[in-house]
Image: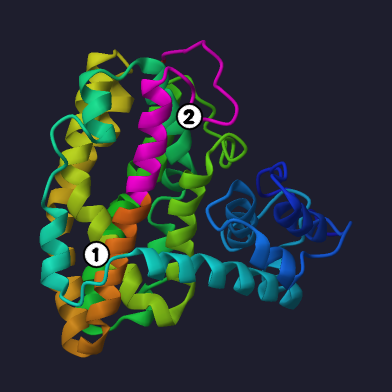
Amino acid sequence: MAHHLEGPRPPAARGPLSAGVLDHLLGTGPLPDAEAVGGAPVDGDDLQLALYVCYELHYRGFAGVDPDREWDPDLLRTRAALERRFLTALRARTPVCDSVEDALAELLVEPVEGTGVTHFLRDEGELWQLREYAAQRSLYHLKEADPHAWVLPRLWGRAKAAMAAVEFDEYGGGRPDRVHARLFADLMTDLGLDTTYGRYLDAACAQTLATVNLMSLLGLHRSLRGALVGHFAAVEITSSPGSRRLAEAMRRTGAGLAAAYFYDEHVEADAVHEQVVRHDVIGGLLEEEPWLAPDIAFGIGVTGLLEDRLAARLLDDWRAGRSSLRAPLPAEVAHTS
């Protein structure tokens, strides 16, 4: 008998869509129909969690769920319906920008001082808010670079070589202790957080789920390879200044050495990656497939759209003195460095 304990436990449902997907995975119920998918709020917890669960089967899966469910044809049809709702909404909301250079230039415009999440955390954030930020971001950072790795077989030439070089850095350059997901787990330990993969899925808000779902959506579809490259460029270009502010926030609040080190590492690494992605990944892709320019620009723009939505959610909650999580973290912090 096969044992399926390699992944985290399945999350709690947040509505009929996610309940239907989870029940189907565990063999206890039918999948939601097209009418249910079409009637659910695209930004809501239920649709975003249902999509997240479908995508997670392509990463580590869930305990008690047969790994072959990754290619369950009925589930893939449901996932496709969820994706159509999500992608249609994203295309409608993202400003059209056919020029990649214009889209890249917008990334270099910093938010008005004090208005961004990293500005807030650097200047006035408290330790409990940094812990919440890390818990929210753990949904991606504990699998950092994995969604972007799917684009490698879909590139060639200069773009492929450059993308592989950046991913090699993300995966620690061959050193397991330097893998960025490992460094983030060390950060979480300094903040007294549980480093178990998927531990904070139940606590994360819908806006966080959407940012991770975007990466999976773009990575799993060859037709969206240009948008995935645009997304990757947006992440790498905006990372260095934000990471510098977060490193300062970790030091100011006494979060711990590993907590600050994770962001220090990204200040240096992503400053280099920015140039490689801009000139060799994007430049190489456009040399081979110039018609993908609008897709690259869309990937840049939609990344900003969802990050802005998440930032608004976090700042609204924190400035009101309330938790941004669905289930607040325990107050105790156990420093280890």
Check the image and tell me how it is coloured: rainbow
In the image: residue 8, left or right of residue 144: right
User: Which residue position holds label 1?
Assistant: 165
Pick whichever of labels 1 and 2 is earlier in the sequence.
Answer: 1
Which residue is pictured at 47% across the width and 13% down the height? Answer: 333
Q: Nearer the viewer, residue 256 or 104?
A: 104
Q: Nearer the viewer, residue 47 or 256?
A: 47
Q: Secondary structure at mark 1?
A: helix
Q: Which amino acid, mark 1?
A: Ala
User: Which residue position holds label 2?
Assistant: 324
6 in relation to 85, above or below: above
73 in relation to 19, above or below: below
In the image: residue 242, left or right of residue 28: left
The answer, for residue 234, to whether it is visible in the render is yes
Residues in magenta, as a range: 307-335
**Structural crowding at the residue carrying mark 1, measured as other residues with C-alpha within 10 Å and reported as few (<14), some (14–19) or many (≥20):** some
